[in-house]
Amino acid sequence: MASWEEIETAIAENKHELHLNGDSVSQRLKTAPLPESLFRIHTLNYLEISNTCLAILPDKISLLDNLLNLALHRNEIVEIPENLNQLKKIKFLDLSFNKITTLPMSLELPHLHTFNLGNNHLQSLPNFGFLPALGILFIDHNNLSELPSGLEKLSNLSELYAAKNEISVVPQSLTSMTALKVLDLSENLLKEIAVDLSLCRKMKDLNIKDNPLKDNRLRKMTTQCNTKSILEYIAQHTNTNGQKGKKGKLKKKADDSIQDDDNEKKIYIMQSKDSKQIISKANVKDVRSYICCVVVKNLDLRDLSVFKKFITLQTKLHENECDMRTKATIATHNAISLKFPLTYEGVSPNSLEIIPLGQTKKVSSTALIDRLKTERDDLRLKKKRQPKTGLYRYIDLVDGKNQFACLKNADGEVISFPPVTNSEQTKTEAIISDVFIEVTSPLSLPQCKYVLEELIKNLFLMDFESKQDDQKRGLVLERVSVVDEQGDLKVVFPSKIDLDFSSIPVVRIDE
């Protein structure tokens, strides 16, 4: 019988997370199913099974009743068991890049926030009205002819990705989705867009490109104009019983019309003159796919108590929003010490070398992990319990992996090894400086953005400030873009849909 050392270790150490991925797992699955012992680890709140030949998801998955995050991407799964509904605590469910053709007749997961069904073989979906906490939904790259029913009940749904399907009609129910900010219906079969879509007042990013739209002008606008212009055109030129012609104009967002009051704290977003760019290589896709970054200009950290608050804030976010770094990891750098463009890539453990925080000499990632494991084991023997502080908590997130993600300077020096450490050479210090903030995630790009937004919001509310000559009060942010190896844009942050805070004024400055 195949040995499942990862599972035995998780049981012995009462682990909260377990990662099973890659060829070694696939080889074992070819001779035997997942062992029964897996489904008795009731301490698990994060389970990842990815990049394997797993075709059948066992019914006993429902026994893992403390799961908060279930990542089952890039397998061979065809069907999802009905009793998945018993995972009542689940918040994140990733079933992308499988071969799923059907879902259970009903989905009742009261706390599910992010649901990824992209890149499957789905032709229809059940009623989604029983997912009240759903905020982000991916159903792109399937064979769907319509959007799922029940969307009008999802008052928290802010992002819906449904590109590359066979959808021919935008349902009127979308207008009742008051939180919707992102709607991607590109590469479908839409011929008309109802005026009701212009009533989605919070919409910041509407993508309806590459549809056979009858309105030639609208079709051109989808590739040339921003969302605001498209929605205004839809409101003025699309008829619904002749009633909603010119009344459907979207009002300007509050922060677009805010007059610049020097006495009021704000968040200012600027485009950099010397564009700061990260090249994300294809080989990082199956390691830690997602990265999103921003620069906080002239952040004043001179006061040691303020600097300690800055470090403590990151620690709290790592424990909560990042779920002990399983969902995302934050790293901060002195931007002056960086050489752009940076490169984000996957490398073998032996070839990754870094000067870890607090150290003076460069070490390989293998040596670093071995040292941390030895220190952890010594502490465990000394204190008779598992160490719960420092980097020891995060060793298991990378231990045993055959590739690691890293961020490199333009000169090839590694400046970050997520989720373990970043470099002593680029560390943030108690001075006034531009601070480069990096967030990486194995789960999704929205997860990166969520953590970045929470960090920026807390910096603002905790009275951190950018020191500016023009007396502007608040934070000044500089956009950072991520591109692929061909130079095609993957993400820019903050984009026009990011940092949509109801209680914090945001001013976007075009340089």
Image: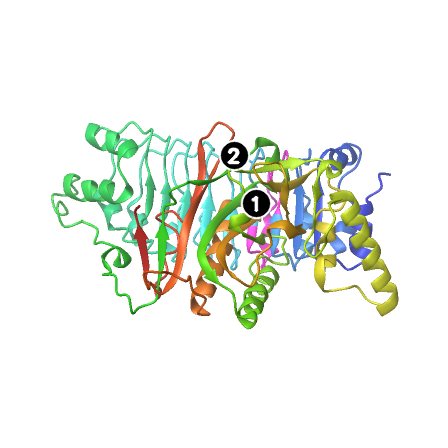
Label 2 to label 1: alpha-carbon separation: 11 Å
Q: Coloring scheme of the render?
A: rainbow
Q: Quadrant of residue 348?
A: top right
- Which amino acid, mark 1? Asp
- Which residue is labeled 2 in the image? 119
Instruction: Give the numbered dot on residue 94.
Output: 1
Residue 260 visible (yes or no): yes
Above/below status of 55 relative to 270 = above
- Judge from the rendering whether residue 129 lies leftward or rightward of residue 231; answer left or right: right
Neighbor class of circle 2 (other Cα within 10 Å; few <14, some 14-19, many 20+) is many
Q: Which residues are magenta?
A: 71-92
Residue 1 position in % (x across, y down): 87, 38
The residue located at (57%, 46%) in the rendering is: 443
Mark closer to the chain start, 2 or 1: 1
Number of marks:
2
Residue 316 position in % (x across, y down): 58, 65
Q: Is residue 74 magenta?
A: yes
